[in-house]
Amino acid sequence: MIPFYVALFLFFAALVSRPTWADDLVFENAHIADPETKTVKEGSLVVKNGRITQVGGKTPAGLKSKKMDATGLWIIPGLVDTHDHSTLNNPGPNGVVDRLTTEDVMKMMLYCGVTSFLDLFADEKAIFKARNLQRQKLTLGSTLYAAGPMMTCQNGHGTEFDIPTRTMDSPDEARRQVDLLAQQKPDVVKIAYDHSEEAPAMSKATMTALIAEAKKLKLKTIVHIGTWQDASDAIDAGATVVTHFGQGEMPDELAAKFRGRGVWEIPTMTYQSDLLYLVENRSLLRSPLLLPLISKKLLAAYQNIEVNDSFVAKILARQNKSRDTYLGAVKKLSDAGVPLMVGTDSGDLGVFHGFSVHREMAIFVRAGLTPWQALAAGSTMPKKFLNLKSGIAVGDKADFIVVKGSPVADIENTQNIETVVQNGKMVDRPALLKFKPIQE
Ligand SMILES: [Zn+2]
């Protein structure tokens, strides 16, 4: 006979080891759109033990999984934001701010079908702690990846936010700082190399040493730039990704240089232009996807935005000046075969955590990309970049969204989310809305 305490132990062990995805899933009669192959398959999407086991065709006979009828619905891979600042809140006009925690942002992202996101600058102590807690399955929401600090020079871009960061002014110091940062296991290294502002910028030699050291440690680098020359220098130095654009028309030879050196780009078009789109078309604020995520006060501040307010006017003037050339740069890079990734730079005016991922894809289409290309930039490309084996291909960890209407015919249909599946499980979306932004 088994002693009572052993029996008790076995009982709880059985409870713990029971697969958490007891409810395997099948979505039947679906359109399953894979941006990687640009193909649509019809039929059943089968999820077993958290993974995709079948894409299209008939549901295998005798399958006891939970079956969902997805007639008229489309399934696409979970989305990814590769340029977020989860500690910078949702700021609005007139000093109105929805104050958010990183945990709030994780929930907002997942609510919007963004199953993973990359924070590109925060207090490294706080952000790595949040990331590590989530990896221990202690936090609900979109899966957080993080760069930690902005690697910058003394008084350079990134030092103006009252967020602790890392500064370096020589190649030796750059190598030392990368080595120290590497101990925190950052998912990427974020570097500010920006000669567009009056603030000092890192020297090319320091940036080059920094990138070389990161490479040695097998860390990918994302370089924030402010001029096209900055982009060219970052490519010379061996950067993995460039984020933002330079000013004015992008030189033709630069697109070829990106392509030749295999460098990727995160344009952050919502940050560069969405306040302007929003002022031109205030119905953007009525999106049913956005409304449950923001406070009434923030919504009202945007609805009543004063275009003559000096702070707002300055941003609108900048966006007015650069919008068309930036749309042209997105198209030029895409035509040259440069991999593009969706990144919103959320934490800035006119941009909203989670929701703006859908806007970024819509703006890519406005730039002349096909919806397939925009969907790839918002899902399969960043997954490849972050080495995530998740999505809707056979063998993938099941991370996908179910939407009403074809996102291939109209990219805005990505906003009509019916269901989100993360790690093979149906997400309880209403539960994700149980957070309260603190308003100011
Ligand atoms: Zn940024």
Image (cartoon, grey):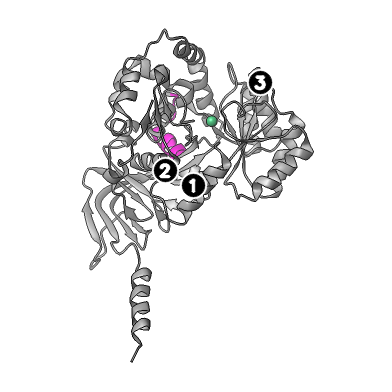
Disc 3 vs disc 1: Cβ atoms closer than 8 Å?
Answer: no
Q: Secondary structure at mark 1?
A: helix
Disc 1 vs disc 2: Cβ atoms closer than 8 Å?
Answer: yes
The residue wearing badge 1 is: 130
Q: Is residue 258 above or below residue 146?
A: above
Q: Nearer the viewer, mark 3 or mark 1?
A: 1
Q: Earlier in the sequence, mark 3 or mark 1?
A: 1
Is 184 placed left or right of 138 in the picture?
right
Magenta run includes residue 162 = no
Magenta run includes residue 369 = yes
Q: Earlier in the sequence, mark 1 or mark 2?
A: 2
Is 372 placed left or right of 338 in the picture?
left
User: Measuring 67% from the left and 22% from the top, which residue is drawn there?
Assistant: 195
User: Measuring 40% from the left and 17% from the top, which residue is drawn there?
Assistant: 94
Magenta range: 367-379
Picture quadrant of ligand 1: top right
Q: Residue reaching furthest top?
A: 308
